[in-house]
Image (spheres, helix red, strand yellow):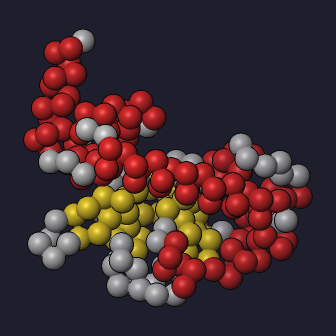
Protein backbone atom coordinates (compact mmCIF):
# COMPACT_ATOMS: atom_id res chain seq x y z
CA UNK A 1 0.00 0.00 0.00
CA UNK A 2 2.70 2.44 0.97
CA UNK A 3 4.77 1.89 -2.19
CA UNK A 4 2.22 3.82 -4.28
CA UNK A 5 2.20 6.69 -1.77
CA UNK A 6 5.99 6.89 -1.57
CA UNK A 7 6.28 6.77 -5.36
CA UNK A 8 3.72 9.57 -5.69
CA UNK A 9 5.46 11.75 -3.13
CA UNK A 10 8.84 11.20 -4.79
CA UNK A 11 7.44 12.46 -8.10
CA UNK A 12 7.26 15.85 -6.40
CA UNK A 13 9.88 15.92 -3.62
CA UNK A 14 12.85 13.87 -2.44
CA UNK A 15 12.39 11.62 0.58
CA UNK A 16 15.25 10.26 2.65
CA UNK A 17 15.13 6.66 3.84
CA UNK A 18 14.37 7.99 7.31
CA UNK A 19 11.42 9.98 5.89
CA UNK A 20 10.09 6.92 4.06
CA UNK A 21 10.20 4.84 7.22
CA UNK A 22 8.55 7.58 9.29
CA UNK A 23 5.66 8.08 6.83
CA UNK A 24 3.82 4.89 7.68
CA UNK A 25 3.17 5.93 11.28
CA UNK A 26 0.92 8.80 10.12
CA UNK A 27 -1.46 6.76 7.95
CA UNK A 28 -4.17 4.21 8.65
CA UNK A 29 -4.81 1.66 5.84
CA UNK A 30 -8.45 0.96 4.97
CA UNK A 31 -10.16 -1.31 2.46
CA UNK A 32 -13.37 -0.09 0.88
CA UNK A 33 -15.76 -2.37 -0.98
CA UNK A 34 -17.41 -1.30 -4.22
CA UNK A 35 -20.34 1.06 -3.45
CA UNK A 36 -19.21 1.50 0.18
CA UNK A 37 -19.05 5.07 1.48
CA UNK A 38 -15.86 6.68 2.66
CA UNK A 39 -17.79 9.87 3.49
CA UNK A 40 -21.48 10.75 3.44
CA UNK A 41 -23.03 14.16 2.96
CA UNK A 42 -23.69 15.76 6.34
CA UNK A 43 -20.78 14.00 8.08
CA UNK A 44 -17.57 15.80 8.91
CA UNK A 45 -14.59 14.76 6.80
CA UNK A 46 -12.05 13.54 9.35
CA UNK A 47 -9.41 12.20 6.94
CA UNK A 48 -7.64 12.89 3.71
CA UNK A 49 -7.56 9.65 1.72
CA UNK A 50 -4.75 8.60 -0.57
CA UNK A 51 -5.90 5.98 -3.07
CA UNK A 52 -3.34 3.20 -3.30
CA UNK A 53 -5.63 0.81 -5.20
CA UNK A 54 -9.02 1.15 -6.84
CA UNK A 55 -11.30 4.00 -7.83
CA UNK A 56 -13.48 6.38 -5.82
CA UNK A 57 -15.71 9.30 -6.63
CA UNK A 58 -16.81 12.52 -4.94
CA UNK A 59 -20.32 13.72 -5.77
CA UNK A 60 -23.35 15.49 -4.40
CA UNK A 61 -27.03 14.76 -4.86
CA UNK A 62 -29.46 17.57 -5.68
CA UNK A 63 -33.03 17.96 -4.41
CA UNK A 64 -34.33 15.96 -7.40
CA UNK A 65 -32.07 13.03 -6.50
CA UNK A 66 -29.68 13.58 -9.42
CA UNK A 67 -25.99 12.91 -8.79
CA UNK A 68 -23.40 15.48 -9.82
CA UNK A 69 -19.84 14.19 -10.10
CA UNK A 70 -17.10 16.35 -8.70
CA UNK A 71 -13.88 14.31 -8.67
CA UNK A 72 -12.65 10.81 -9.42
CA UNK A 73 -9.72 9.43 -7.46
CA UNK A 74 -7.69 6.43 -8.58
CA UNK A 75 -4.25 5.05 -7.74
CA UNK A 76 -1.94 7.89 -6.81
CA UNK A 77 -4.70 10.45 -6.14
CA UNK A 78 -5.95 12.09 -2.96
CA UNK A 79 -9.68 12.35 -2.31
CA UNK A 80 -11.66 14.16 0.40
CA UNK A 81 -13.93 17.09 1.13
CA UNK A 82 -11.06 19.42 1.92
CA UNK A 83 -13.33 22.24 3.11
CA UNK A 84 -15.00 19.97 5.65
CA UNK A 85 -11.62 18.49 6.63
CA UNK A 86 -10.10 21.90 7.38
CA UNK A 87 -13.11 23.68 8.89
CA UNK A 88 -15.00 20.88 10.61
CA UNK A 89 -18.26 21.83 8.91
CA UNK A 90 -20.51 19.03 7.58
CA UNK A 91 -19.59 17.76 4.13
CA UNK A 92 -21.69 18.61 1.11
CA UNK A 93 -20.26 15.60 -0.72
CA UNK A 94 -20.49 11.84 -0.73
CA UNK A 95 -17.39 9.78 -1.42
CA UNK A 96 -17.82 6.14 -2.35
CA UNK A 97 -15.93 3.39 -4.14
CA UNK A 98 -16.59 2.60 -7.80
CA UNK A 99 -14.28 -0.41 -7.46
CA UNK A 100 -13.00 -2.36 -4.47
CA UNK A 101 -10.33 0.00 -3.18
CA UNK A 102 -7.54 0.48 -0.68
CA UNK A 103 -6.82 3.88 0.81
CA UNK A 104 -4.40 5.36 3.31
CA UNK A 105 -6.15 7.72 5.72
CA UNK A 106 -4.44 10.81 7.12
CA UNK A 107 -6.26 12.39 10.08
CA UNK A 108 -6.29 16.13 10.76
CA UNK A 109 -3.92 15.70 13.69
CA UNK A 110 -1.52 13.55 11.67
CA UNK A 111 -1.78 15.98 8.75
CA UNK A 112 -0.43 18.72 11.02
CA UNK A 113 2.17 16.49 12.62
CA UNK A 114 3.55 14.97 9.41
CA UNK A 115 4.72 18.36 8.15
CA UNK A 116 6.59 18.96 11.41
CA UNK A 117 8.12 15.50 11.59
CA UNK A 118 8.96 15.33 7.87
CA UNK A 119 9.44 18.95 6.73
CA UNK A 120 9.60 18.07 3.01
CA UNK A 121 5.92 17.01 3.28
CA UNK A 122 4.98 20.66 3.71
CA UNK A 123 6.40 21.35 0.23
CA UNK A 124 4.74 18.20 -1.13
CA UNK A 125 1.29 19.32 0.06
CA UNK A 126 1.87 22.85 -1.25
CA UNK A 127 2.63 21.42 -4.70
CA UNK A 128 -0.56 19.33 -4.53
CA UNK A 129 -2.65 22.38 -3.61
CA UNK A 130 -1.17 24.44 -6.42
CA UNK A 131 -1.87 21.67 -8.94
CA UNK A 132 -5.40 21.28 -7.58
CA UNK A 133 -6.15 24.98 -7.96
CA UNK A 134 -4.88 25.01 -11.55
CA UNK A 135 -6.93 21.89 -12.39
CA UNK A 136 -10.10 23.35 -10.85
CA UNK A 137 -9.61 26.65 -12.70
CA UNK A 138 -9.20 24.80 -16.01
CA UNK A 139 -12.27 22.66 -15.32
CA UNK A 140 -14.33 25.74 -14.46
CA UNK A 141 -13.22 27.52 -17.62
CA UNK A 142 -13.91 24.41 -19.70
CA UNK A 143 -17.40 24.10 -18.24
CA UNK A 144 -18.38 27.53 -19.56
CA UNK A 145 -16.42 27.71 -22.81
CA UNK A 146 -16.03 24.20 -24.26
CA UNK A 147 -18.56 22.21 -26.23
CA UNK A 148 -19.58 18.80 -24.91
CA UNK A 149 -17.31 17.15 -27.49
CA UNK A 150 -14.35 19.33 -26.51
CA UNK A 151 -14.88 18.44 -22.83
CA UNK A 152 -14.93 14.73 -23.66
CA UNK A 153 -11.86 14.95 -25.89
CA UNK A 154 -9.92 16.87 -23.24
CA UNK A 155 -10.86 14.33 -20.55
CA UNK A 156 -10.06 11.32 -22.72
CA UNK A 157 -6.69 12.83 -23.71
CA UNK A 158 -5.64 13.76 -20.18
CA UNK A 159 -7.14 10.79 -18.32
CA UNK A 160 -7.75 7.85 -20.66
CA UNK A 161 -8.07 5.53 -17.65
CA UNK A 162 -11.25 7.35 -16.63
CA UNK A 163 -12.88 6.54 -19.93
CA UNK A 164 -11.93 2.85 -19.59
CA UNK A 165 -12.75 2.30 -15.92
CA UNK A 166 -15.73 4.51 -15.17
CA UNK A 167 -19.30 3.82 -16.28
CA UNK A 168 -20.45 6.11 -19.06
CA UNK A 169 -23.24 7.70 -16.99
CA UNK A 170 -20.68 8.84 -14.39
CA UNK A 171 -18.37 10.24 -17.07
CA UNK A 172 -21.34 12.15 -18.50
CA UNK A 173 -22.22 13.53 -15.06
CA UNK A 174 -18.62 14.61 -14.50
CA UNK A 175 -18.67 16.44 -17.84
CA UNK A 176 -22.04 18.02 -17.06
CA UNK A 177 -23.77 16.45 -20.04
CA UNK A 178 -26.54 13.90 -20.54
CA UNK A 179 -25.51 10.25 -21.02
CA UNK A 180 -27.27 10.31 -24.41
CA UNK A 181 -25.12 13.26 -25.46
CA UNK A 182 -21.99 11.36 -24.49
CA UNK A 183 -23.15 8.32 -26.47
CA UNK A 184 -23.74 10.50 -29.51
CA UNK A 185 -20.30 12.15 -29.16
CA UNK A 186 -18.56 8.78 -28.90
CA UNK A 187 -20.49 7.46 -31.91
CA UNK A 188 -19.61 10.55 -33.99
CA UNK A 189 -15.93 10.28 -33.04
CA UNK A 190 -15.90 6.60 -34.04
CA UNK A 191 -17.42 7.49 -37.43
CA UNK A 192 -14.82 10.25 -37.97
CA UNK A 193 -11.97 7.75 -37.48
Give the residue at x 66% y 47%.
8
Is 31 located above or below residue 191 in the figure? below
Q: Quadrant of the N terminus?
A: bottom right
- List x then y, in percent, for residue 6: 71, 50
Q: Nearer the viewer, residue 39 or 53?
A: 39
Viewed as shown, does residue 188 lie left or right of 10?
Answer: left
Q: Quadrant of the C terminus?
A: top left
Give the residue at x 48% y 53%.
137
Q: Nearer the viewer, residue 19 or 14?
A: 14
User: How many labels sit on residues?
Assistant: 0
Q: Residue farthest to the top?
A: 193
- List x then y, in percent, for residue 85: 54, 78
- List x then y, in percent, for residue 129: 62, 60
Give the residue at x 50% y 50%.
135
Give the residue at x 11% y 72%.
64
Q: Nearer the viewer, residue 181 or 31?
A: 181
Corner quadrant of residue 118: bottom right
Q: Residue farthest to the front?
A: 145
Amino acid sequence: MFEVLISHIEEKVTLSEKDKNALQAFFVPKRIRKRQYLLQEGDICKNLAFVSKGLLRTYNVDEKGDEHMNVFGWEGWWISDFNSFLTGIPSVFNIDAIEDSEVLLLSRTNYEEITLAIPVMDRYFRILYQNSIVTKERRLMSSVTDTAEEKYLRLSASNPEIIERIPQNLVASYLGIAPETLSRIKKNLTVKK
